Amino acid sequence: MLYIPCPHCGLRNETEFHYGAESGVAYPEPNTLTDSEWAHYLHIRANPKGWLAERWVHFAGCGRWFNLWRNTITHEIGPAYLPFTKQPKSPDNSGQEGSKA
Amino acid sequence: MKKVTFSFDDKRYKGLLGEPMAAALLRSGLLSITKSTYHGRPRGVVGLGVEEPNALVQLVSGTMESMRPATVIEVAEGLAASSLTGVGSLPDIPENARYDKTNRYVDVLVIGAGLAGLRAAEAHLLAGREVLLIDDQPAPGGHLRHLGLDLPSDLRDLLTHKKLTYLSRCTATGLYDQNYVVAIERRSDHLGSAAPVNSARIRVWHIRADQIVLAPGAFQRPLIFANNDLPGVMLSHAAATYVAVHGVRLFKRAVVATVDNQGYRDALRLHQSGVKVQGIYDARAEAKGSSVEASRAAGIPIRFRATVLDVAANKKGACQRVTLQDLDTNETYKISADLLAISGGWTPIVDLATHIGIKPQWSEEHAAFLVNHNTEQLRTVGMLAGDFGDDEHPAVFFGPVLDDEQARRAYIDLQRDTTLHDLRRAVGAGLHSIEHIKRYTTIGTAHDQGKTSGMITIGALCQLNGFAQGGKSSLSPAQVGTLSFRPPYVPVPFAALAGRERGLLSDPIRITPIHQWHKEAGAIFEDVGQWKRPWYFPKSGESMEDAVRRECVAARTGVAMMDASTLGKIDIQGADAAVFLDRIYTNLFSTLPEGQCRYGLMCKTDGIVFDDGVTTRLGKNHFLMTTTTGGAARVLGWLEEWLQTEWPDLKVYCTSVTEHISTIALVGPKSRQLLQALVTDIDLSKEAFPFMHSRMGTIDSIAVRIARISFSGELAFEINVEYGHARYIWERLWSLGQPYDLTAYGTETMHVLRAEKGYIIVGQDTDGTQTPHDLNMSWIVSKKKEFIGKRSFQLPYLKATGRHQLVGLLPEDGSEVIPEGAYITLLNAPTDEHGKTSHIGFVTSSYYSPTLGRAFALALVADGLNRMGEVVDIPIGKKVLRANICDAVFLDKENIKSQL
């Protein structure tokens, strides 16, 4: 049971949240993309071993979306941050791809 | 201690309150408790606690819980149990005991109240932290209790510390991410018939701790030899405890086979309790330590490099004679004994640590897998961390050397009746991974999850795999594999997990403000998500079919009304509300004039229809969206996701108002006449109040909003009113409507009416693969603007032919209602060599229409919009129905009636 730091409500159990996959995948300008690029936007998300910046929503709490660093192997939780704010470095400082939003 | 009487297999036994049932049975002379699952062999008590693989019983008193080890059941007045073989049974009576759950956040959680756990708790308490200490035994002390010793006085005092919560009979069943522990506390079974009725029998604890200290201790492991399953073959620590602490006088002569000094300590306890210990047979070449010296001084014969090979049974099938072998000369010799106490080393309880992925490390010195973990969050102490005590001479770890015949009688998993022979066959079949071997042999898959069998399997595999890999004598356990477990550590009754969320409390029930009226009117209800909705309103003697036909006729020819309060309703306000809706819906909403309504369809980014409903513009920057009854939360979440994560610049605020506003649909040609009698401040005429318009007004000075929305295709009015007034309005309509033969109708009639008009229900007439075009709703897809999902319509697979499209179906036999979900095939479709036919679609909605005087259906059919007029087959069992594909709108194709 992950213990997730909602930026608005503090630490809460995973069961209060819904998962939103990789963060930072901005909605593209649809008509500038080829079919293949659009399909990539629709269906492909990063799922690396290790640290990943993800989207979560505290649906059973404040209802707000936020971003969160999480290690997909160890399940360690890193810093959470609000959408459209500066992304903190990943906890291992790898500077891996993450949120633009 | 208080004496009590309990029964086992219908015989009465005496015991001491709180002692393990296994101890009481042994003291009464009952050695053989059950028969084994598959081989039917007599079996007795082996261990001391939850590791027990044999002595499972079925409780026949109290809650009649099944498959409980007799080693952990506490004897109490009124306790009754029976033996069981392998499989328990659930009682026929309902489970009436109480169960509850609780949450706890704490500085430190210590799991295990043995010496190591108590010392850890002490240190944290001294540092000022709050400590929760849980332990599965009735009292603290761990192995001290097995030795019959009291706690040191300083630790006794510790238990009353004000920052300590100590829970006995509380077993941690799982360790999860971020220091989350689930534990079950058995609170009243030990009280027997004196248990208070109102207290929860089991409490489930959900614990989150800043730090967890794991002090679970260890299980003694057995040895593998022929007939090692006979009653009278016991783990030495268990045997010595039953004899020395619980006063079991069943055994006269014992043999101890050991690989460590524990065998000596237990031999001494047996000896001191009057059992003649005929010898300690130690597989090691030598042994040092105080217990070895003491055994020698007590005159117990000791032989090194010797172990047990086989056991012969007496007439009752219990241990009678032990065959031992000299490991250097292979010479064998036989000794009579009614107790064979075996000590195969210690297996620290790594279970919880492995739940979160920690890999135990092999320690040659301990002949055991250990977990040495010391972080801020999690620390291991005691035997799990390798603290085996002072008097320890290293154990050896070795596999058995048995011939084929002996291997068939040498049990590894007593509960599963799996033998060394089975293990050899698995390796012979080419299996090397312990995970594969477990599944192939079923070792470790019984209720005890391999607590005693896991390590000896690894021991035997070291040997077998060693041979398999080029004749080396053996591999180290570290090379063979490690132990890993999944929760729960012990079986957990489902009733405990359910807690109080059973029956009526298993899921919230949502009712409308008019619910009580529906009940009084005799409505039959159906569940729509959590909602209770009237399904139909039968008059006395009416079948469902009769009632639905009557309700349909009333709506089409007179006037009828339905409680539509469950419709999802979202209030959307803000300067950018119209812009936002333009992006969400496939059609335009910014052009919608104030006071008017428009049907809208929304898609996900992949172009697939997601929800639909009518949205009304209440003001320039104010909309009221309706959603499907089941989709309300989903849609609100969808709107919020876009507003928060993509378009934070839009000033839009969404609020769920489903339970603020109640909706009554008044339907039928006479609806205007009836409603006009009640509403004096709105002109309901066609000219003053056209279709898809909304007006504010009052009924008996209660504010209402009336909208000309029709989900039936008839002239209809939806009356929206604040929740608390809904029943009043309903009843006013009802009494006023009697001269018009006003008829209440339910969801079934609603479905017939909407299906006759080809109105879809998202999720019933769609299966998550339909675009608006597939639903023949291209008319609602704007070409002028961008909206979510639009780009996807250009993708080749959404433009391809052969997609499932919504059509109507008219069965050739108009009296035959096709079952929903039925597959549709081509006419006289050929069958393949297996007699199978491929389908081209399926029926999504199917009803009898009193208005059409025949059955009809909606269906999703491959390329269906190009198959108008085609005749298709619908195989139902051995029967084949025949139907014509037609347009999905069966009535009033020009939509004249709703606009009257």
Image: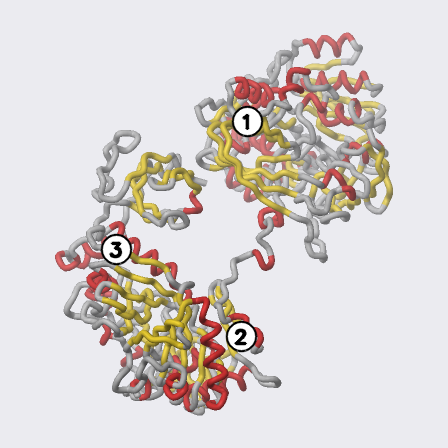
How packed is label 1: few (under 14 Cα within 10 Å), some, or many (20 or more)? Answer: many
Which residue is pictured at 20% across the width and 59% down the height?
A: B576
Which residue occupies the foreground of this view, B2 or B680? B680
Q: Amino acid at mark 2?
A: His
How packed is label 3: few (under 14 Cα within 10 Å), some, or many (20 or more)? Answer: some
Quarter occupied by residue B415:
top right
Q: Which residue position holds label 3?
A: A42
Relative vertical location of residue B675 with respect to residue B800 in this rendering, above or below = below
Which residue is pictured at 58% across the width and 44% down the height?
A: B101
Are dots 2 and 1 in contact, CB under 8 Å?
A: no
Q: Earlier in the sequence, mark 2 or mark 1?
A: 1
Residue lying farthest to the front in this orientation: B701
* Numbered mark located on residue B657 in the image: none
Which chain's residue wears label 3? A
Q: Amino acid at mark 3?
A: Leu
**Closer to the camera: disc 3 or disc 2?**
2
How far apart, in angstroms, are the residues tagged by discs 3 and 2? 46 Å
The x, y position of residue B460, in whole percent, is: 59, 30
Relative vertical location of residue B817 with respect to residue B492 in this rendering, above or below = below
Quarter occupied by residue B329:
top right
Are dots 3 and 1 in contact, CB under 8 Å?
A: no
Quarter occupied by residue B190:
top right
Quadrant location of the C terminus of chain B in the rendered image: bottom left
The x, y position of residue B841, in whole percent, is: 38, 74
Q: Which residue position holds label 1?
A: B131
Q: Which residue position holds label 2?
A: B518
Callout 2: SS: helix
Which residue occupies the foreground of this view, B509 or A69? B509
Query: Is residue B137 something that shows in the picture?
Result: yes
Q: Amino acid at mark 1?
A: Val
